């Protein structure tokens, strides 16, 4: 049985990946500090289905705690590592950049050091479309030089990509950075637009639309992102950076129409000025993911939104926090 360490295991993408890997017969060691950015009750709910599984171990610790991390590596001797833990809100990063630098860069350095020391077979790191900033040449390709992220969050993600390359170069580590594009779905992080909208619409509250509603995002269903992550984990490629997106940007107004159709009611809405850290469009060129991972998105937006709405009704309307 192969062992995978997953940082951020109680989070949005992490908790979905845990379930997938356990179903595939892996021994999964989840690391999470249950950061209070949003309610820890939600994160406890995310991991609750796995606690009784003998192949799942949960370690409650911070990736900035190098001593405690080392004990986990020594105890479990992982074959693979999936590094998803991060401070993840672009707007918050503008206000509290020091926290993002500490967790996203220094924490990632701790992970890289332990992967080097213990010789893991493959390390997969969650990067972000935020590294592209407002790059005007669409769709965004991985070989396009990124370097103008609009938020310290995007800057930390690009810094980790660069740092991880140095570990590949110097220590021959297999490292794949996955640039995720606007992931949504079950266990959605509360601060994201799809979660905010479904919550407010189901409660009959007013939603906010950034700008005039024309900004476009490459919304990608979490189940598709999980498939890509597992396929990357199982396929050491030396060093790669790979876009993971739906490759079909949707304007906020179009997204709202999908939500109204799925929920079956019009939204009460108002428009607000866009945040300076918000990009105009995200659009992934996924030809590299198709070629290297044999991956392509399968879930259309309406189906994915329906999954999100059903999950929210079952898990959040009953247990508001």
Image: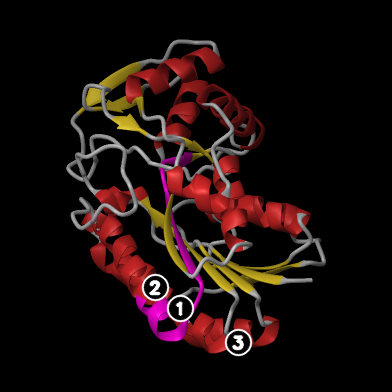
Residue placed most toward the observer, 62 or 181: 181
Residue shown at the point (47%, 22%) measured from the top left: 201
1 and 2 marks in contact (CB < 8 Å): yes
Image check: 275 left or right of 241? left
User: Which residue is disc 2 drawn over?
Assistant: 164
Q: Earlier in the sequence, mark 2 or mark 3?
A: 3
Image check: 50 left or right of 264? right
On the image, the x and y values in percent for residue 244 come to: 46, 46
Q: Earlier in the sequence, mark 1 or mark 2?
A: 1
User: Which residue is disc 3 drawn over?
Assistant: 71
Residue shown at the point (52%, 66%) measured from the top left: 237
**Residue furthest toward the front?**
291
User: Which residue is disc 1 drawn over?
Assistant: 112
Q: CA distance from mark 1 to mark 2?
A: 7 Å
Label 2 sits on a secondary structure element that is helix
Label 3 sits on a secondary structure element that is helix
On the image, the x and y values in percent for residue 19 come to: 70, 53
**Position above or below: 259 against 295:** above
Magenta residue check for 229: no
Q: Is residue 3 something one can see in this rendering?
A: yes
Q: Magenta residues?
A: 166-183
Quadrant where the N terminus sits is: bottom right
Q: Is residue 244 something one can see in this rendering?
A: no
Residue placed most toward the observer, 118 or 140: 140
Label 1 sits on a secondary structure element that is helix
On the image, the x and y values in percent for residue 100 come to: 32, 64
Q: Quadrant of residue 186?
A: top right
């Amino acid at each position: 049985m192969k062992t995978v360490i997953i940082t951020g295991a109680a989070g949005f993408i992490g908790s979905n990946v845990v379930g997938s890997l356990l179903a595939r017969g892996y021994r999964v060691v989840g690391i999470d500090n249950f950061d209070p950015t949003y309610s820890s009750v939600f994160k406890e709910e995310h991991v609750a289905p796995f606690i009784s599984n003998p192949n799942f171990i949960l370690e409650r610790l911070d990736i900035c705690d190098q001593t405690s991390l080392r004990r986990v590596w020594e105890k479990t001797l992982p074959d693979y590592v999936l590094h998803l833990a991060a401070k993840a809100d672009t707007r918050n990063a503008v206000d509290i950049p020091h926290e993002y630098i500490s967790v996203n860069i220094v924490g990632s350095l701790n992970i890289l050091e332990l992967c080097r020391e213990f010789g893991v077979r493959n390390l997969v790191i969650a990067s972000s479309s935020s590294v592209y900033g407002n790059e005007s040449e669409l769709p965004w390709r991985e070989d396009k030089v990124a370097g103008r992220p609009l938020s310290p969050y995007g800057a930390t993600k690009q810094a980790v990509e660069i740092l991880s390359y140095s570990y590949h170069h110097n220590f021959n580590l297999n490292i794949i950075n996955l640039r995720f594009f606007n992931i949504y779905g079950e266990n959605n992080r509360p601060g994201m637009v799809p979660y905010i909208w479904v919550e407010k619409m189901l409660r009959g509250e007013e939603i906010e639309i950034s700008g005039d509603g024309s900004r476009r995002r490459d919304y990608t269903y979490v189940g598709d992102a999980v498939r890509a992550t597992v396929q990357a984990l199982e396929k050491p490629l030396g060093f790669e950076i790979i876009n993971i997106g739906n490759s079909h940007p949707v304007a906020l107004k179009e997204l709202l129409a999908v939500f109204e159709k799925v929920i079956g009611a019009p939204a009460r809405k108002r428009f607000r000025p866009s945040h300076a850290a918000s990009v105009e469009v995200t659009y992934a060129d996924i030809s590299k993911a198709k070629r290297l991972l044999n991956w392509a998105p399968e879930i259309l937006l309406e189906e994915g939104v329906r999954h999100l709405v059903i999950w929210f009704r079952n898990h959040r309307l009953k247990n508001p926090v």
